[in-house]
Amino acid sequence: MKDIICQLFEQRFGKEYRIYAAPGRINLIGEHTDYNGGFVFPGAIDKYMMTAIQPNGLDKVRVESVDMKDYCEFGLREEDAPTQQWARYIFGVCREIQKRGFLVKGFDAVMAGRVPLGAGLSSSAALESCFAFALNDLFNEGKIDKFELARIGQSTEHNYVGVICGIMDQFASIFGKEECLMRLDCRSMEFEYFPFKPAGYRLVLVNSKVKHELVDSPYNKRRQSCENVAKVLGVETLRDAEMDDLEKIKGSISEEDFMRARYVIGEKQRVLDVCAALERGDYETVGERMYQTHWGMSRDYEVSCEELDFLNNIAKSCGVTGSRIMGGGFGGCTINLVKEERYEAFVAAVMDQFPKKYNVRPEIIPVVISNGAHREA
Ligand code: ADP
Ligand code: MG
């Protein structure tokens, strides 16, 4: 990938440039916890967005996207927004940097990525983080702190793409570290690295390629349930609730709200359990909690779907250590922690059984926890 972008950059713009990269991410555990003030537990992966980039002394940006086979030029004022979706991410990053009082001047760039698009690995955050990091380094001597770089990506999604997302994806892409996962407290925004060195195991995603579009805004309903229960408990968010508290009010809330809250409160504890397990290198417990999360998302939170439950069951029957839905639900990927010796059989079972039943070939995406945004050369 590096060779391609270097070659293209030299053909189009010249021999002087720098190279930057920023990764996609996984979230090992901690799903639907962000809006409940809880924890998420992401890590950066070995799939990157990469750019060759150089200031051009002009007042415009010229970018070539290898993957989109497209080229775009735009100015740096608000009214200069490009029409191509992929370029809007870059424009947004430029604008959000400027809005914060930092500098962006014209530049040339060639970019390419290896983060699968729309698979739940956050290719968009990789793209934003790559340019936020590069433009900080090129024009601002690295003065913008890392958290602000993540916020610049998040604001880009909000203001230039129309996706109202949390901070996790950009945070992970910026702060990621080899052999480390990060527990991010979505209330205080404090975070901590935990060792993730699963010797003898592999981490693999199975992209079901299924996405169920739901008509009745299930996310808003889930949020509403969480808020209902928090209110009855007299806490700000379910982060502050324990399972005992929930049991005590069982009679005064709906069965549905009870199930939703049971998932969220359980998930908070599962993240903490996984952190403790990682510190003692206990990957069997990590895997158990992943299965429990899947169960909770499927039965209590009801955000799974037939296809993902099917993948989860294949994992179980193949002796996979841990498996669960990754992301909001209703489709997308499962994330699986698999012992080396079970890996081949698991992949074979998925590729045999899933297409037979659903007529879709899933994609197998092995991942290794890797470094966040950085300069390559
Ligand atoms: P994801 O879950 O992968 O973040 P999104 O829909 O949020 O999915 O972002 C995908 C969009 O990001 C693409 O439609 C494209 O505009 C942009 N993008 C991601 N990767 C690339 C790439 N390699 N080259 C160009 N644009 C990309
Ligand atoms: Mg995205």
Image (cartoon, rainbow, N blue to C red):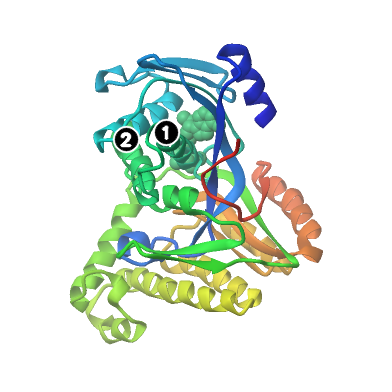
Residue positioned 31% across, 60% down in the render = 35
Q: Give the image quarter of residue 98.
A: top left
Eyeballing the image, is 372 above or below 286? above
Residue 288 place in picture, x, y as percent: 59, 75
Residue positioned 58% across, 15% down in the render = 14
160 relative position to 339: left or right? left
Quadrant (top left, top right, bottom left, bottom right) of the N terminus = top right
Q: Which residue is mark 1?
A: 135
Residue 335 place in picture, x, y as percent: 60, 58
Residue positioned 65% across, 54% down in the render = 368
Q: Residue furthest front?
A: 141
Crowding near pointer 2: few (<14 within 10 Å), some, many (20+)? many
Dot 1: what SS? helix
* Three-letter amino acid code of the residue under disc 1: Leu
Residue 227 place in picture, x, y as percent: 24, 65
Residue positioned 56% across, 25% down in the render = 17
Residue sitting nearer the eye, 186 or 195: 195
Dot 2: what SS? helix
* Three-letter amino acid code of the residue under disc 2: Ile
Eyeballing the image, is 184 above or below 149? below
Q: Are marks 1 and 2 in contact (CB under 8 Å)?
A: yes
Residue sitting nearer the eye, 259 or 19: 19
Quadrant (top left, top right, bottom left, bottom right) of the C terminus = top right
Q: Which sits earlier in the primary sequence, circle 1 or circle 2?
A: 2
Crowding near pointer 1: few (<14 within 10 Å), some, many (20+)? many
Q: Which residue is mark 2?
A: 97
Residue 136 place in picture, x, y as percent: 40, 37
Which mark is drawn over residue 68?
A: none
Eyeballing the image, is 280 above or below 195? below
